[in-house]
Amino acid sequence: MVVEESGKTPSEASSGSALQRIVHLYTTSDDYCLGFNIRGGKEFGLGIYVSKLDPGGLAEQNGIKMGDQILAANGVSFEDISHSSAVEVLKTHTHIMLTIKVRSCFKNITFVS
């Protein structure tokens, strides 16, 4: 597991700007399971959000939470991407570097599977 915090100071992080993290997830070519599902996409007027976690799965082990927003994966921006394109980016590599916006500002959102 490798987790890098963004270069924000504690005062910047608490001043209303959302905390971002870089999370590296590694899978094998036999098992591309990252341990999470996503919801959203530009066709819904939304960003891409983590909607479900596999208990004990790779994403949960690396600190990803339901409601976290995925801003980018392997350098591909997820801020204006379709759901199907986001899924394709996430499923085509054994090393995924995610830029995550921590869910603290989304804690009241409920995702229904």
Image (cartoon, helix red, strand yellow):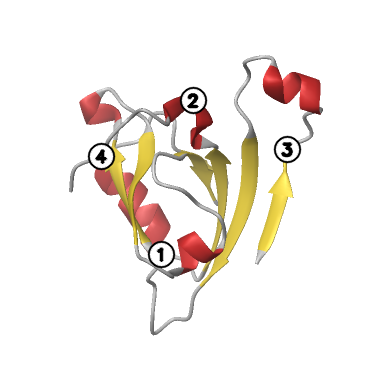
Tell me the residue at 51%/41% (across/down). 72
State the residue position of label 2.
105
Comparing labels 4 and 3, the label whose residue is closer to the camera: 4
User: What separation in Å lies between label 2 and label 3 (alpha carbons)?
Assistant: 17 Å
Comparing labels 2 and 3, the label whose residue is closer to the camera: 2
Q: Is 77 situated above or below 90?
A: above
- Could you say which is closer to the camera, residue 106 or residue 71? 106
Q: Is 10 situated above or below 97?
A: above
Whole-percent x and y of residue 5?
A: 72, 43
Whole-percent x and y of residue 32?
A: 39, 73
User: What separation in Å lies between label 3 and label 1 (alpha carbons)?
Assistant: 25 Å
Q: Find residue 111 and name its label.
A: 4
Q: Quadrant of residue 37?
A: bottom left
Which numbered disc flags the more N-terminal residue, 2 or 3?
3
Type of residue at label 4? Phe
Type of residue at label 2? Cys
Helix, strand or loop status at disc 2 = helix
Q: Find residue 6 and name its label.
A: 3
- Could you say which is closer to the camera, residue 110 or residue 88? 110
Comparing labels 2 and 1, the label whose residue is closer to the camera: 2
Circle 2/circle 1 CB separation < 8 Å: no
**Quadrant of the snapshot with the N terminus:** bottom right
**Label 3 crowd bin: few (<14), some (14–19), many (20+), radius 10 Å:** few
State the residue position of label 1.
92
User: What separation in Å lies between label 4 and label 2 (alpha carbons)?
Assistant: 15 Å
User: What separation in Å lies between label 4 and label 3 (alpha carbons)?
Assistant: 26 Å
User: What separation in Å lies between label 2 and label 1 (alpha carbons)?
Assistant: 30 Å
Type of residue at label 1? Thr
